[in-house]
Image (tube, rainbow, N blue to C red):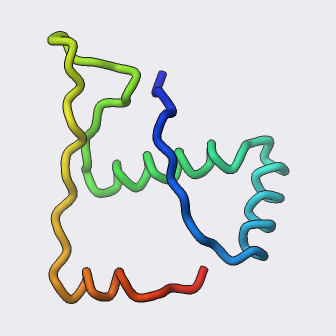
Amino acid sequence: MELKTARLTLLIDPAKKTAFEHLCARQDKTPSQVVRQLIRDYLAQYGVAYVPSGLSSESGQQPAAAEMPRRSGSARAHAKSPRRG
């Protein structure tokens, strides 16, 4: 079981948030469950390996998650620009 100790904060359009929460409720899932699944799927899609925080290696230390390739400078600049939800 993964330890859920890290918090991810994001900004989203209020109407989109409400629609998402209603859809999650209809599927009998919490928004957090759905977001965690989306993150796991996204990591798998790009072949990023990680060891869930609740599992440790035989040495007792937890390996760090594999890093995704860095974006180019122009993509980084674009990522900093404001986006609408």
Residue 26: horizontal and vertical position, in percent?
84, 50
Quadrant of the rendering where the C terminus is positioned: bottom right
Q: Quadrant of residue 21?
A: bottom right
Q: Residue at x 47, y 27 (%)?
A: 3
Q: Residue at x 46, y 27 (%)?
A: 2
* Looking at the image, residue 82 lies above or below residue 8: below
* Looking at the image, residue 27 lies above or below residue 62: below
Left or right of residue 9, residue 55 in this image: left
Left or right of residue 60, residue 16 in this image: right
Q: How many labels does the image show?
A: 0
* Looking at the image, residue 80 lies above or below residue 68: below
Residue 60: horizontal and vertical position, in percent?
21, 12
| 50, 27: nearer the viewer | 50
| 63, 6: nearer the viewer | 6
Residue 52: horizontal and vertical position, in percent?
37, 30
Q: Residue at x 35, y 51 (%)?
A: 43
| 75, 11: nearer the viewer | 11
Residue 14: horizontal and vertical position, in percent?
75, 74
Left or right of residue 37, residue 50 in this image: left
* Looking at the image, residue 52 lies above or below residue 17: above
